[in-house]
Image: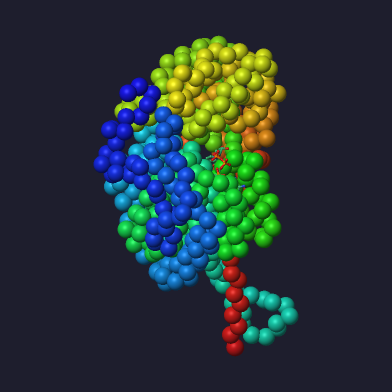
Amino acid sequence: MSKLSNDLDLLGDAARARLGQTFGLQIGGKTVETPESYALTDPSTGLEFARAAEARPEDLDAAVAAARKAMDGEWKRLRPHERELRLLRLADLLEQNERELSEIETLCSGRLLSNTAGVDVRYSAHVLRYMAGWATKLEGQTMRLSVPYIPDGELRGFTFREPIGVVGAIVPWNVALGIAVWKIAPALAAGCAIVLKPAPQTPLSALRFAQLAAEAGIPAGVINIVTGSSPRLGEMLVSHPGISMVTFTGSTEIGRRIAVSAAGNFKKCSLELGGKSPVILMEDAEVEVSAQAAAWAILANHGQNCCAGSRLYVHRAIHDQVLERVVDIVAGIELSAPLLPGAQMGPVVTQAQKQRILGFIQAGITEGAALLTGGTAPEHDGCYLRPTVLAGVTSDMTPAREEIFGPVVVVAAFDSEAEALHLANDSRFGLGASVFTQDLGRVHRMTQGLEAGSVWINIHNALDVAMPFGGWKESGMGNDLGESSVLAHTRLKASVHRYG
Ligand code: NAP
């Protein structure tokens, strides 16, 4: 067994038992088989290990109908505290099933087991617990009114926050279960039901999650999962007349199409899209600490993070030192099978993604960037490529402008705070940005000046469930996480009462 190919004997019993199976849809609390299925392949070998159902239009209709029935039925009748308790139970079940969930996520995506266990399972349990608390805290307002054309009587106004309706969620493969829970948890806290479409590569964790939700006492039909390998399924979900709100995480290109389609029938839309997030090291940044942080800002999850630190800007006073250290760290990364304990970097998700990333690297070299490490792929059937540093990159070069979504960082030097801000903001994206400095005045100026939904100081990619996470510019609209993500799943009703 090559060190690059997953050894399936390492799997625990629960995940091993799923090898070779065909996974049905989860609709209305039942597993639904369909006539067609498609292959799920292990990115570390390119080999098929299971299959997933191809949902048909009638399956989608059934999922939306099941969600509507559940939302207007048992889910609606439950008191908010009971909704909270069931979400808390689901969080416990997630943790109890960590090994199986993280292993099936790793098999589908090629992401490290340490990452899928930490981010998709443990962090998701944390998200569920935070969101559970909101079920009992959705409040309206009360006011005394003075409608001018109703001169008599006493008028009182009340506002109510009601669930927005059946939510259609579409999620990517890069943190498949984690992002699915970012969508499901606030929707359920607000009293909605959901139909979720995972990315075709990574459907298994969401399917298992729906089964655990049933065990936690979440009524049948509140969570429905439809899988398929064609973009048609996502398009049908977005345009389905029974869906009231679309919540999407994925690329800017697909997000744009979804916004247009959802506008056609006035669906509310929340879009979490791509990024090209800058990491800025000022001249007073501590070299070793900030170089480590900058390297891991792009290496984490193989660079397949929406807010990966994919553009590194370093003050000229420390540029050469930092660059040497970052190259050292990146060049020292060993590629290995993601199921191996202690693995540092596994494959990217598909061969197509690997070729796309290599294409961006080549474009950068052709345009004049210096390849300092990486840029190649090992001879192996898995989707591996070596993490890469491109230096001397100017803002007009392709790898500085496009979201590569892989372990490739572009590096450039700057001479002043104003130049750093200009470089950082010279992008169509605006998801995250970080600054490493000890100067408090500069912290405030740069926090204000950076055009990004999240700004981190002396750290990169710190996402807390209590903080809204969303993009500016072409990185999206709306946000996941935080109170506002729950409120987004409600609609306001204003009611006027007359007395006497
Ligand atoms: P993607 O190609 O945009 O796909 C995302 C999801 O959309 C998949 O489930 C995909 O399914 C579906 N889809 C494709 N075409 C569709 C259409 N016309 N209508 C409706 N749904 C459609 O993105 P990806 O490659 O999976 O994920 C990587 C992207 O996600 C990156 O751009 C990354 O930055 C972004 N992301 C953003 C955040 C954030 O919070 N801002 C977080 C994580 C990832 P099919 O493949 O079957 O079409």
Q: Quadrant of ligand 1?
A: top right
Residue shown at 42% from the left, 25% from the top: 345
190, above or below 73, in the image: above
Coloring scheme of the render? Answer: rainbow
Q: Is 215 in front, or is 54?
A: 54
Give the quarter of the image for residue 222. bottom left
Please state, as top left, top right, bottom left or bottom right, where the N terminus lies in the image.
top left
Left or right: residue 148 versus residue 448 is right
Q: Kindly identify the residue that appears in the image at 57 percent across and 64 percent down.
A: 242
Residue 252 place in picture, x, y as percent: 63, 40
Residue 337 in sight in this render: yes
- Give coordinates of residue 331: x percent, y percent: 46, 15
* The C terminus: image quadrant: bottom right
Please tell me which residue is depicted at 32% across the width and 29% down the height of the picture. 7
Q: Furthest-bottom residue in view?
A: 500
Residue 180 visible in this rendered orientation of the protein: no
Please indicate whether residue 217 sits to the left or right of residue 360 in the image.
Answer: left
* Depth check, front residue: 6 or 157: 6
At horizontal 64% and vertical 30% (from top left) the residue drawn is: 402
Q: Nearer the viewer, residue 458 or 319?
A: 319
Q: Residue furthest front?
A: 35
Q: Position of residue 153 (x, y in %)?
A: 64, 85
Counting from the top left corner in percent of width and height, residue 263 is at 68, 56
